[in-house]
Image (cartoon, helix red, strand yellow):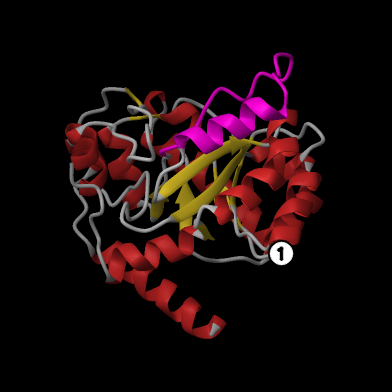
Amino acid sequence: MKKLKYWTLATCLLLFFLSGIQPAAAVSNQPINWGFEKSRNHKSANPGEPLVKLLNKYDAFFMGDPSQKYIYLTFDNGYENGYTEGVLDVLKKQKVPAAFFVTGHYLLDQPNLVKRMADEGHIVGNHSWHHPDLTKVTDERLKKELDSVKEKTEKLTGYQGIQYLRPPRGVFSERVLAKSKELGYQPVFWSLAFVDWHTNAQKGWRYSYDQMMSQIHPGSILLLHTVSKDNAEALDKAITDLREQGYIFKSLDDLMIDRTFHQPYFFSL
C-alpha cells in the first residue's frame, strides 16, 4: 500500500512539472498578504474569487474538498520553544499525520526533532532558509532560500517527495507563485488560523481550542505555530473532539492525490 502511495505521489509530481508554467519574469511582483473571510457555521473560509483563481493558476492551494470532512494539520516551525516534542507525542498517540514547515534556523538548531518528524511519517515542508519576504528577493536568492531547506532536509531525513512550500508570513506575489512552481515547489496556504505566535501573550489552552472548533470546516488546512503553549495544551482534546464530530485527519500528500486525480479545482465560489 505504501509503495502504491509513493508511486501515485510521483505521478502527481510529474503532472505538476508538466503543467503549464508562465515565466516568473513575465508576471506581477505586487505583494499579496494571504487572508480570507473566516469560516462561520462550518462554511468554507473565503479569500475571494481573484485570489482563488490566482492560486489555481499555479496549482497552489489553501484548503481541500469542501464536501468532505477532512482536516489537514500543519505547523510552522521558525524556532523551538519547547513544545514540539509534546506536539509530536500527541500526534503519535492520536495517529494523526501533519506537515511541519521549517526554516533553516530550525533545521540547524533542532535536527533531532526534524528527524523525528520524518521518522514518524510527517511531512517536513519548506518555510525558506532565512524567513524573508519572498517578494523582495531576487529569483536567484529565492531559489537559494528554498533549495537550501530542501537539501538540508533531505540530508537529515532521507526524505524526497513533493516539496511543499509555505511562504513566510503568508506574503507572496504572482511572481513568487510562478517561480516556486518553476523550481518544483508546491505552495500551501491555509484556511484556518488565529493569532497564536505571541509567546508572551498566551491566553490559555481554551482560547486555542475554541478558535479551532469555531473555525473548523470541511477541507480545512489548519495552521498552528509550535511556539504556542496554548496550542500544545489544546491539541489532544481538539483532535479527539473533532473526530467525534466526524472529521478525519489526512496528510497533504492525500490532498495532492485527490487534487490531481479526482477533483483538481475544489475552490469554486
Q: In the image, 112: left or right of 49?
A: right
**Residue nearest the viewer, comparing 190 with 30:** 190
The amino acid on which the numbered mark 1 sits, given as a three-letter code, is Glu
Does the segment drawn in magenta span residue 212? yes
Q: How many numbered discs? A: 1
Does the segment drawn in magenta span residue 25? no
**Residue nearest the viewer, comparing 156 with 81:** 81
Q: Is residue 131 above or below residue 185?
A: above
Where residue 238 sits in the image (x, y, percent)? 63, 44
Q: Is residue 95 above or below residue 62?
A: below
Q: Is residue 128 visible?
A: no
> Which residue does the numbered mark 1 point to in the structure image?
120
Where residue 138 sits in the image (x, y, percent)? 39, 31
Q: In the image, 164: left or right of 158?
A: left
Where residue 126 sits in the image (x, y, percent)? 54, 46
In the current view of this chain or complex, which residue is farthest to the front?
Answer: 244
Name which quarter of the figure residue 32 lies in: top left
Determine the secondary structure under disc 1: loop
Name which quarter of the figure residue 139 lies in: top left
Q: In the image, 104: left or right of 160?
A: right
The boundaries of the magenta stretch are 191-215
Crowding around mark 1 (Cα neighbors within 10 Å: few <14, some 14 to 19, many 20+) is some
**Residue nearest the viewer, comparing 258 with 78:** 258
Q: In the image, 200: left or right of 25?
A: right
Q: Is residue 62 visible?
A: yes
Identify which residue is drawn at 39% across, 52% down. Answer: 186
Task: Point out the image quarter for the C terminus.
Answer: top left
Identify which residue is drawn at 22% across, 31% down. Answer: 48
Where residue 39 sits in the image (x, y, percent)? 37, 33
**Residue nearest the viewer, comparing 132 with 90:** 90
Q: Is residue 183 above or below residue 175?
A: below
